[in-house]
Image (cartoon, rainbow, N blue to C red):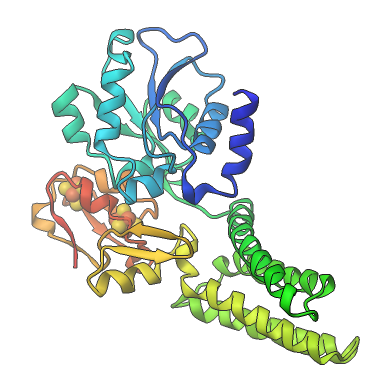
Amino acid sequence: MGVKDSIKVGLSYFFRWTGFPIEPTLIEIGNPTSESPVLLTCNFILTVKRVLKAIKNLDCYLLIAPSKGINVWCGACGDDFHTDSVLSILKTSGINDLVSHRTLILPQLSAPGIDPIVIKTKTGWNVKFGPVYAKDIPSFIEQKFYKSEVQRIVRFPLSNRIEMATLYFFILFALISIIYWISAIFLPILNLLLYLDTILIFVIIIYGTMAILPSISTKTGKIKVWIYEGTILLLIVLFNIIIKFDLLYLIWNIVSSLLITFIMAEDFHGLTPIYKSELGEKTWKKGDEKMKFLFGEYKLQPYGKIIIERDKCIGCKICIEVCPRSLYVFDEKDKKVDLRNFERCINCNACVKRCLAQCLEIK
Ligand code: SF4
Ligand code: SF4
């Protein structure tokens, strides 16, 4: 990657909702031969960087398919990374002439948007859904396309939570800074100290909620965000009483913490990859197919309970392979699947869309 791409990678951490594309292409890693594996990912620059780092010691081909610069999961759920993205790069990259096999490894999280049957019918390529995380690709290939349960599950470790918090902090920091300093022209009480105080409140609410609250299980995201806010309000009052009572700062801190909490509570679970979006579900149940949140508009997938027509199940295990919450179990006796812990389903729709017997439905 050149200097320009490195700058784009840096910026993509903060502006990822706008999409950060690179040109769709074919990249040769190491010294690939006609037998080497063929991998495919989206054209979001940060994803490409992470995949390249994970596979740097392999000899393989990497296809970068168009997704409008959106990451794999959001692109596949929002219709930016779809079957036609894969068909187009297979046709234009020249990969057909470079390898003798026809096995294509896709990221597992692309399953809601990409149909392996259409790809097989139109191109002859067989799709394998690889692991959720790029770091597991080498072992997936080494194990002859086997992935363990751990490699199929989406996690939300502290490092990812901090990354997400930084993204939301940056958006809201930019917005509040503009509003604050324009208002300061007319209101002299809005000085630098009060501005820094406001930013500190934003840091405490955004980083605190994202770092701590995903680990706490509650029925709705709103409940835990408001409990956290109650604790912060209490600390603000105590701080003002114990350290120095200043009515302006007290009122200002209460108002700014309430403001940011309203935004975080609007769809806290939807800000994480391990809970289903409550705003998305509410919007879908109202009959809308798109949801607006912060500055973006997002295409929605159906929300509801997964129903299995067990008699029709052919035991192909695709649902097990693509579910990022590992909710399906295989019944060895009947050779069919059952769903467990339904409350943990995030309605990503991967299982419903990829079921070979079309025996899964969301109602
Ligand atoms: S069971 Fe839920 S989380 Fe799992 S693949 Fe299906 S929709 Fe997604
Ligand atoms: S994908 Fe459908 S047919 Fe295949 S095991 Fe799952 S429920 Fe059964």
Residue 326 percent across, percent down from the top left: 37, 53
Q: Quadrant of residue 276?
A: bottom left
In the displayed structure image, the side of residue 267 where residue 159 appears, left or right: right
Q: Is residue 27 above or below residue 344?
A: above
Residue pictured at 48% horizontal, 48% vertical: 18
Foreground residue among 216 and 256: 256
Residue that sits furthest to the left in the current view: 311
Residue 271: percent from the left, percent from the top?
49, 62
Q: Residue at x 69, y 71 (%)?
A: 180
Which residue ends up furthest to the front in the rendered image? 186
**Ligand 1 picture quarter:** bottom left
Query: Is 201 located above or below residue 139 in the figure?
Result: below
Give percent across and percent down for residue 262.
Answer: 54, 78
Residue 328 x, y percent position in the rendering: 30, 54
Asked whether the viewer can see residue 328, the reply is no
User: Which residue is at the front of the view, 314 or 133?
Assistant: 133
Is residue 236 in sight in this rendering? yes
